[in-house]
Amino acid sequence: MPVITINQFEGRTIEQKRKLAKEITDSIVKIYEVGADSVSITYFDIPKHNAAKGGKLFID
């Protein structure tokens, strides 16, 4: 069972997440030759004040 985790900043719409889930699932089904029901995708929406790069928060 493929398990996909997507870490991203907050702000994507539900429709964008639906489209991405469909595209990822379709690709995995084709390449791995598994059923769509076996593909699991979890989104983690991260607030920009909870992530940093280069010593700075992304909100800075």
Image (cartoon, helix red, strand yellow):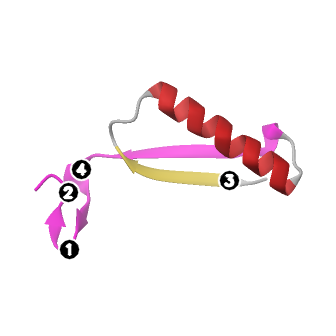
Q: Quadrant of residue 2?
A: bottom right
Residue 18 falls left or right of residue 7: right
Residue range highlighted in magenta: 36-60
Tell me the element at label 3. strand
Q: Quadrant of residue 13?
A: top left
Which residue corresponds to mark 3? 3
Q: Say whether disc 4 or disc 2 marks the residue closer to the N-terminus.
A: 4
Is 41 situated left or right of 55 in this image? Answer: right
Q: Give the x, y percent position of residue 39.
A: 74, 45
Provide the residue designation for mark 2: 58
Question: Along the polypeptide, which appears first: circle 4 or circle 3?
Answer: 3
- Residue at (76, 50) in percent of width and height: 28
Q: Residue at x 23, y 64 (%)?
A: 52
- Asked whether residue 46 is drawn in magenta, I would say yes
Q: Which mark is residue 54?
A: 1
Residue drawn at x 26%, y 59% as measured from the top left: 51
Give the left or right position of residue 9, taking residue 60 as reference: right
As shown in the figure, which amino acid type bears the numbered disc 4? Lys
**Residue 19 point in image, percent of width and height:** 58, 32
Near mark 2 (Cα within 10 A), the count class, few <14, some 14-19 or many ≥20, is some
In this image, 57 relative to 24: left or right?
A: left
Q: Answer yes or no: do the residues labelled 4 and 2 have beta carbons within 8 Å? A: yes
Q: Quadrant of the C terminus?
A: bottom left
